[in-house]
Image (cartoon, grey):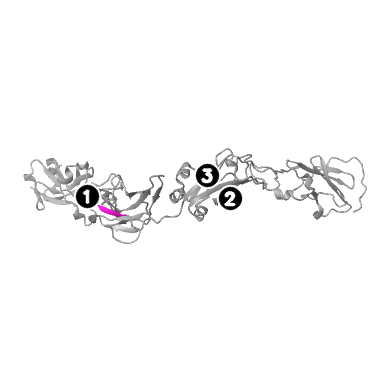
């Protein structure tokens, strides 16, 4: 295109033009390099574009500078087409660094205006890894391997720490691999470095899916780093790990005394007065060296129980005592077994058996309190108890030491007002009372004298089977007081 001659008169100062643009520059990330060029953009001329400025109708001259070096000038004799507002920067300029780009525009009247400056970043150096530093896995994984239980306990993730490399920048991508040998890899995932990762241990999470897909055995984990520009580090030395991640067949246990089928069953407590028998299914895949532990996960201190003692020895039957039952009335006990490998300490756990424990019905199956001075009939004569009366509670089903007994009387006084008298409150059962029952619960004479004659009074009893549960009502006793 023919060049126009320009007036060389001294121009007046002009406002700065908009900075040049590099469309292929990557979006900035917090803490990352500004206007970073992807590595793929460095293999050919770099396109730099410009916003259209005012007063372009008469043409002009556009000159691009790369630092202090002139890249190219373009000339127009008429209005400048927007699709021509670009300059291609030769590859020879595209070397590592942070060049500053600017341009000038000289109008047909000879007025020259500078632009704002654009700084870009060119990075052609791969991240520098210490190739002898592999991924850092938890000691338990190094010693015992990647087990199915480990993955289950950790949300189906295997976590590793990436050793420090230079430089660590936001936007770096850590690509990690899982393979059958040190040279055959499959991509197991990627992590993008965030600003908050800088200065802290850099952690990655490997999903259990690729781990299981490669099967059990000796497997290898490695990684490489790809910076935001696309430079790829050499691969780090892989870590060799033992993998035992395939799911084992561990059915839930069964309970001999329970009713129902499947994973949710129920238990009538009256069938458990001599304890219950938890059975590990014969279909469970168990190594002869593994320890089996039954866990009865109920409520309170007495409602939980664990045992590794089979009966008979060597069988898959494990007794649970009756004392573990009453704290769980009207609750669900989770029953399972776990297997412990003696060499590694690795633990495998079965699914839970959901055991709904019913209430003791009818309530009359529990002992009813009785009056020592009037053991039979419904009448108590005031004249026959000059020193007050006493009550006894025979031993009951599931009685055990330290259960708490409460007993109280509700009656009507001589003014026709209701009143309550507490005889015992949360009284612990002693070991000797387990076989003899509770004796000597006293109702003093003065309380009897408060009562209205020829009216009934009621004796209530509750037993708390465990401190963590509410008391259970026992059968009440009703007597009529006469002279």
* Secondary-structure class at tag 1: loop
Percent of width and height locating residue 270: 22, 55
Q: Can you say which quadrant of the picture contains the N terminus?
A: bottom right
Instruction: Quadrant for residue 441, please give it.
Output: top left
In this view of the protein, can residue 413 be seen by the observer? no
Residue that appears at 88% across and 41% down: 11
* Secondary-structure class at tag 3: strand
Say left or right for 234 vs 249: right
* Secondary-structure class at tag 2: loop
Instruction: Quadrant for residue 283, please give it.
Output: bottom left
Percent of width and height locating residue 236: 59, 44
Name the residue that disc number 3 marks: 160
Q: Please identify, in this view, whether the residue under mark 1 or under mark 2 is nearer the observer.
A: 2
Name the residue that disc number 2 marks: 183
User: Pointer 3: residues within 10 angstroms few (<14), some, or many (20+)?
Assistant: some
Percent of width and height locating residue 452: 13, 47
- On whether residue 278 falls in the magenta region, the answer is yes
Q: Earlier in the sequence, mark 3 or mark 1?
A: 3
Q: Which mark is residue 398?
A: 1
Asked if the residues shown at circle 2 and circle 3 are in contact, with their CB atoms under 8 angstroms apart, the answer is: no
Spatial distance from mark 2 to mark 3, Cα to Cα?
20 Å
Looking at the image, the residue that sits furthest to the top is 199
Q: Nearer the viewer, residue 443 or 398?
A: 398
Residue that appears at 77% across and 43% down: 101
Q: Nearer the viewer, residue 463 or 135?
A: 135
């Amino acid at each position: 295109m023919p060049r126009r001659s320009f007036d060389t008169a001294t121009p007046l100062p002009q406002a700065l033009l908009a900075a040049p643009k590099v469309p292929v520059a990557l979006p900035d990330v917090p803490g990352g390099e500004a206007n970073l060029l992807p590595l793929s953009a460095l293999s050919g001329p770099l396109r730099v574009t410009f916003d259209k400025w005012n007063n372009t109708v008469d043409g002009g001259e556009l000159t691009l500078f790369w630092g202090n070096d002139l890249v190219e000038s373009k000339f127009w004799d008429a209005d400048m087409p927007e699709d021509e507002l670009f300059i291609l920067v030769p590859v020879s300029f595209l070397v590592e660094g942070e060049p500053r780009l600017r341009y000038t525009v000289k109008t047909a009247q000879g007025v020259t205006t500078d632009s704002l400056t654009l700084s870009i970043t060119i990075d052609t150096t791969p991240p520098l890894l210490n190739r002898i530093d592999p991924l850092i896995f938890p000691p338990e994984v190094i010693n015992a391997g990647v087990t199915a239980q480990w993955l289950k306990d950790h949300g189906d993730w295997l976590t590793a720490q990436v050793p420090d490399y230079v430089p660590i920048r936001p936007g770096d991508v850590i690509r990690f691999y899982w393979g059958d040998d040190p040279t055959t890899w499959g991509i197991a995932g990627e992590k993008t470095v965030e600003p908050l990762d800088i200065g802290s241990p850099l952690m990655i999470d490997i999903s259990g899916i690729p781990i299981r897909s490669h099967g059990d055995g000796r497997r290898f984990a490695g990684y490489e780093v790809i910076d935001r520009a696309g430079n790829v580090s050499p691969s780090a030395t892989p870590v060799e790990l033992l993998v035992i991640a395939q799911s084992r067949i561990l059915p839930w246990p069964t309970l001999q005394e329970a009713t129902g089928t499947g994973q949710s069953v129920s238990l009538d407590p009256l069938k458990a007065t001599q304890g219950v028998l938890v059975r590990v299914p014969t279909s469970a895949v168990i190594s002869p060296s593994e320890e089996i532990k039954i866990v009865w996960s109920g409520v309170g201190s007495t409602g939980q129980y664990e045992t590794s003692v089979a009966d008979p020895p060597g069988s898959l039957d494990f007794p649970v005592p009756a004392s573990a039952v009453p704290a769980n009335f009207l609750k669900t006990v989770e029953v399972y077994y776990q297997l412990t490998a003696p060499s590694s300490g690795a633990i495998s756990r079965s699914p839970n058996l959901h055991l709904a424990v019913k209430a003791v019905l009818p309530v009359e199956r529990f002992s009813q309190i009785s009056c020592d001075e009037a053991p039979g009939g419904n009448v108590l004569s005031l004249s026959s108890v000059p020193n007050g009366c006493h009550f006894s509670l025979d031993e009951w089903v599931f009685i055990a030491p330290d259960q708490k007994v409460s007993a109280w009387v509700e009656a009507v006084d001589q003014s026709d007002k209701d009143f309550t008298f507490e005889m015992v409150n949360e009284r612990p059962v002693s070991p000797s009372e387990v076989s003899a029952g509770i004796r000597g619960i006293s109702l003093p004479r003065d309380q009897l004298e408060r009562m209205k004659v020829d009216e009934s009074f009621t004796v209530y009893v509750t037993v708390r089977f465990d401190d963590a549960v509410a008391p259970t009502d026992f059968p009440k006793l009703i007597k009529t007081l006469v002279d």
